[in-house]
């Protein structure tokens, strides 16, 4: 007998049904053993409140991606704990979605089928899956290419599809590992603007790893700076910029933006 499908009353998943508070407490992580061991993180404490957009920056090799994968449950910390609403993270879960540096889409599936893969595997009905894919493809601006395949899309469009796929599982927390790092400057700036709108619309918490200080200040509600390896937090500041008006409504034009960018760049340069 075939398994019964889950029929949802609306285009919503299950992972983001309630606010999720993520805590990283005393996390140290070491790769390898004995003389070949490589310390990646040392004594990291971080709290991500519901609805925050936290950007992690720091020098190459400081453990940003390792920290993100510990949050995602892909690694288990050598010491310390990662919890969501006080429940230990023991592996990947529906409450957390992951967007990698490369889109990692299934090339043999259409854009729509890629977005629907998570809900389909969880038993969501065909009608509800279609509602979800319609909702999120519209949100990321891919509704008109839903029946195309990933190899027919530009790099920026593929990354939008990956974001839509993560959102379709309705996670409360979205973890993003330099998703725009491989894109050209113009595409990157456009997707930054779009991601801010998606974050405001979807109401998710986002933890975003980047090498770009400017990107971190533009996107984040908080910027967290990690030291060189083994990484630990040396700076944690909310991004508070004044309201601004103009023909080009871009926070990057504000003197306060430039001052914060310079301050964070200085922290990275002196760690």
Image: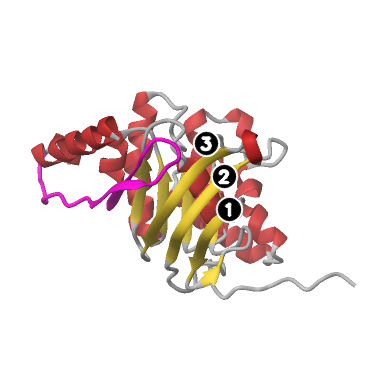
Tag 3 secondary structure: loop
Q: Separation of disc 1 and disc 2 at Cα?
A: 6 Å
Q: Separation of disc 2 and disc 3 at Cα?
A: 22 Å
Tag 1 secondary structure: loop
Tag 2 secondary structure: strand
116 on left or right of 50:
right
Classify mark 1: residues with Cα within 10 Å, few (<14), some (14-19) or many (20+).
Answer: some
Boundaries of the magenta span: 221-246
Tell me which label, 2 or 3, sits earlier in the chain. Answer: 2
| Residue 224 located within the stretch drawn in magenta | yes
Front position in the image: 67 or 102: 67
Residue drawn at point x = 64 percent, y = 46 percent = 114
129 on left or right of 237:
right
The circle drawn on residue 30 is: 2
Tell me which label, 1 or 2, sits earlier in the chain. Answer: 2
Tell me which label, 1 or 3, sits earlier in the chain. Answer: 1
Discs 1, 2 touching: Cβ within 8 Å? yes
The circle drawn on residue 101 is: 3
Q: Position of residue 95 (x, y in %)?
A: 54, 64
Q: Looking at the rendering, which quadrant does residue 209 occupy?
A: top left
The circle drawn on residue 78 is: 1
């Amino acid at each position: 007998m075939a398994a019964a499908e889950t029929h949802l009353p609306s285009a919503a998943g299950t992972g983001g049904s309630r606010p999720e508070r993520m805590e990283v407490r005393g996390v140290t992580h070491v790769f390898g053993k004995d003389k070949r061991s490589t310390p990646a993180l040392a004594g990291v404490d971080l709290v991500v409140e519901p609805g925050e957009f936290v950007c992690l920056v720091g020098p190459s090799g400081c453990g940003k991606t390792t920290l993100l994968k510990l949050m995602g449950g892909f690694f288990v910390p050598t010491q310390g704990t990662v919890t969501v609403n006080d429940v230990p993270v023991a592996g990947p879960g529906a409450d957390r979605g992951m967007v990698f540096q490369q889109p990692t889409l299934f090339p043999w599936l259409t854009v729509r089928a890629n977005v629907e893969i998570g809900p389909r595997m969880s038993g969501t009905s065909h009608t509800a899956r279609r509602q979800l894919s319609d909702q999120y493809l519209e949100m990321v601006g891919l509704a008109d290419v839903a029946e195309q395949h990933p190899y027919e899309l530009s790099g920026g469009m593929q990354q939008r599809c990956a974001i839509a796929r993560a959102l379709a599982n309705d996670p409360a927390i979205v973890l993003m590992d330099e998703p725009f790092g491989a894109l050209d400057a113009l595409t990157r700036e456009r997707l930054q603007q779009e991601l801010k709108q998606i974050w405001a619309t979807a109401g998710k918490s986002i933890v975003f790893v980047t090498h770009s200080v400017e990107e971190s200040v533009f996107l984040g509600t908080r910027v967290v700076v990690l030291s060189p390896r083994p990484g630990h937090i040396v700076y944690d500041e909310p991004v508070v910029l004044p309201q601004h008006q103009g023909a080009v409504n871009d926070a990057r034009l504000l003197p306060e933006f430039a001052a914060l960018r310079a301050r964070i760049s200085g922290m990275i340069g002196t760690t």
